[in-house]
Image (spheres, coloured by chain):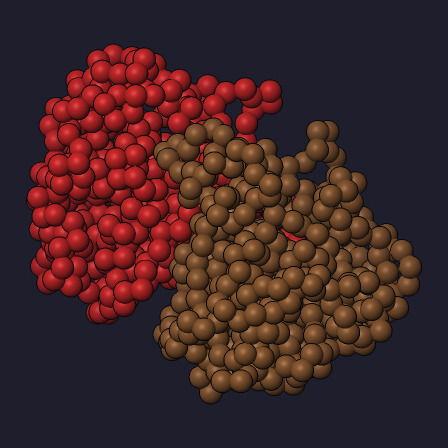
Chain colours: A red, B brown
Amino acid sequence: MADSAQPAPTAASTDPQALGVMQGVPPPAERTVRVSDTTSWRFPNTRWSFSHQRELGASAAIRRGPAPVAALPYALRDDLDAVAFTTQDGHAMTWGQAVDETFTDGLVVLHRGQVVYETYRGALQAHIPHLAMSVTKSIAGLLAAILVDEGALDPAALIPAYLPELAGTAFADATLRHVMDMTTGVRYREDYVDPDAEVRFYGVAAGFSPPPKGYAGPTTIFDFLKTLKKQGEHGEAFAYKTCNTEVLGWIVQRVAGKPFAELVSERIWQKIGAEEDGYVMVDSTGFALCGAGLNVTTRDLARFGEMLRLGGRCNGRQVVPEAVVADIAAGARTEDFAKAGYVTLPGWSYRNQWWVSHNRFGAYTARGIHGQVCYVAPGAEMVVARFASHPTAANGNGPLDRISIPSYEALAEHLLRG
Amino acid sequence: MADSAQPAPTAASTDPQALGVMQGVPPPAERTVRVSDTTSWRFPNTRWSFSHQRELGASAAIRRGPAPVAALPYALRDDLDAVAFTTQDGHAMTWGQAVDETFTDGLVVLHRGQVVYETYRGALQAHIPHLAMSVTKSIAGLLAAILVDEGALDPAALIPAYLPELAGTAFADATLRHVMDMTTGVRYREDYVDPDAEVRFYGVAAGFSPPPKGYAGPTTIFDFLKTLKKQGEHGEAFAYKTCNTEVLGWIVQRVAGKPFAELVSERIWQKIGAEEDGYVMVDSTGFALCGAGLNVTTRDLARFGEMLRLGGRCNGRQVVPEAVVADIAAGARTEDFAKAGYVTLPGWSYRNQWWVSHNRFGAYTARGIHGQVCYVAPGAEMVVARFASHPTAANGNGPLDRISIPSYEALAEHLLRG
């Protein structure tokens, strides 16, 4: 059991089924998780709650629509678990060990469009959407880039041109490009451990954290964004701050005139042959959490990545303009990125809310805290879609990255060899 | 606009699109609806919120699964709007007028399995699930009846045999049959206007009503049910009390070992060729509101009714045992029902959480407050699936029934003639 003395939690020792998290009608009090008492965000409860977000709060459907499911051809390979690599801190490890070490809930690897690896652990199953956390940002960034490509948005425009409400805030003299590439100068501490960090109040405004006693602050994301102040200058350095994505999501929805969930459905999910409806968590006024609220199945995330790998095409149909995909893949200035000090991501950049590796596979990736990923490696014809519930929520995904970044590269290398 | 002086609200004057309810990013404050300030339950906001429940609170998916959609053949008829009838209070009216007068959001009429009438109004569209309110009860009752048919439940067993937690409560000496047919003697006032009525605290425990200031009562449905006391004797009279259904839902889930949403999906929704996933609202511990929380599309509710009309079969496959459907259709003792004093439902009875008309069409129906209905009339080969957001929440659906009950019978008569 989880309560017994153990050196460190493992995927096996924190399996939510074995622990009985939310099992029974009703579950025992000590295995019941809720948002209101923060138990839903405590590890190992997260091993259950990341696969059951909609049962914990309000959400909006991302419909797959009436189109047929795009078949995923299977060519499972039993040689992948043994693929060896060295972690960034020097340990020898195999792919199979890494899947376990990183608290994987769901994992699909596509090679040349075929499923070569698939697993579900913990509380996740193939048909269940899992919380994608900041992978959501990359979807919001993609929508924005599509609207830029269509001429509906101007990257050089100042934010108040779209959102007059943000005149007088940190975003008054920021451009859309600054927000898209997270180079704004705004006081926003993305520190999940500091109780005074702005990200905490984002959680309260968004509805996924309970308000502190006597809380009188903003209760919607809109009102929260209006409270943010400037710190430093715009356009000088990459700094990962979720508030940028919420501003971006607000702009996208206002300009397109539709809620985020409908946009994701109409523009993407209905066109990639998704198997299941996805959803996005919403705040108390029904506004999607564009920075963290997406929930989709592992297979559908893989389909999404495969569409990008094929230059924005799915079954021969252009879903996302090829120029938009190319713009993401090309990345941004690595010197801006370097200032953020991610030791696990040397030489990377950040473009349109995507993390760009500039590695030999031309890989770019959506990344979510606790181990979510949609890693697209065109040079290896590989896509990795992964959901996880790693216990650590650290900026830069340090503990995870030291394992997962080299593991993806080793797998790409292995698949490239045939 | 709704603010101008009008004699009484009409469907047209309260159209949520025209009023701008939840339109805009963000919507204006006076057009924003939330659960926390009760605005989501105020008419005319309900004309929007009944079609957007999941955006207001936690829910669990009722998956349609991978089976193909069951085609609904269309044979729309333009003669139905003119079908004339007399309301129970003596006014001449047509079917088309009744659709409007009863604040219809969605309506599908099947005759011999073909769609002869279909309309969507207000905030509802064909693909959007609508709050079914007490139609949920009939699904819970159907699941229980199936488990009785399979021998997993015994109608004569006392409730604590399944739920030891309810020893010492009103349900200690009630049988499963008493609960299924709502003939328990329990103090539970289903009065939506009385602020001290037990149904108010059901709402708080369920999470769809905000707690009163200083509230220290139950915060889960389970804990709420434990507080209920006996009043009168069991088995003597029908009395419509949602608490019976929550007890029934608890039993069904405990005995089947699965959550309500999964049971509805596996036993019914995956087998009727549903078009869209449905869902059920859940309390703060993820427990489905078996008495009121179902949300499905109008077409899928029609498919469900058609399956019952065909003796439990869909596409030649037995979904629900024929004996279970026959047991519902046969109804219960009309003298027990008469004691409840429903003047709009003379000669009716209540069986397995279904309302049984004993009319010349052998009609039985699921009924939800504000105008939800799944009306199955085997003798006329007719099914009516209807969602609505009528302003009145009155026991017995009085204002609605005086129009809708004779309207369904007139339509059945008309269709029967050819």
Residue A376 seen in the figure: yes
Q: Residue at x 42, y 21 (%)?
A: A197
Quadrant hosting residue B233: bottom right
> A251 left or right of A7?
left
Instruction: Work out whether A7 lies above or below B80.
Output: above
Residue A403 seen in the figure: no
Instruction: Work out whether A71 lies above or below B113.
Output: above
Quadrant hosting residue B257: bottom right
> A226 left or right of B398?
left
- Residue B396 in picture, x, y percent from top left: 72, 59
- Check the image and name the residue furthest to the bottom: B316
- Residue A345 in picture, x, y percent from top left: 20, 34
Q: Residue at x 80, y 69 (%)?
A: B337
- Residue B279 in picture, x, y percent from top left: 50, 57
Q: Residue at x 9, y 59 (%)?
A: A417
Instruction: Work out whether A242 lies above or below B372.
Output: above
Q: How many marks do you count on the picture?
A: 0
- Check the image and name the residue furthest to the right: B232
> B266 left or right of A64?
right
> Which is more toward the observer, B74 or A114?
B74
> Which is more toward the observer, A139 or B199?
B199
- Residue A219 in picture, x, y percent from top left: 49, 27
> Which is more toward the observer, B120 or A176?
B120
Instruction: Work out whether B148 lies above or below B54.
Output: below
Q: Residue at x 72, y 46 (%)?
A: B192
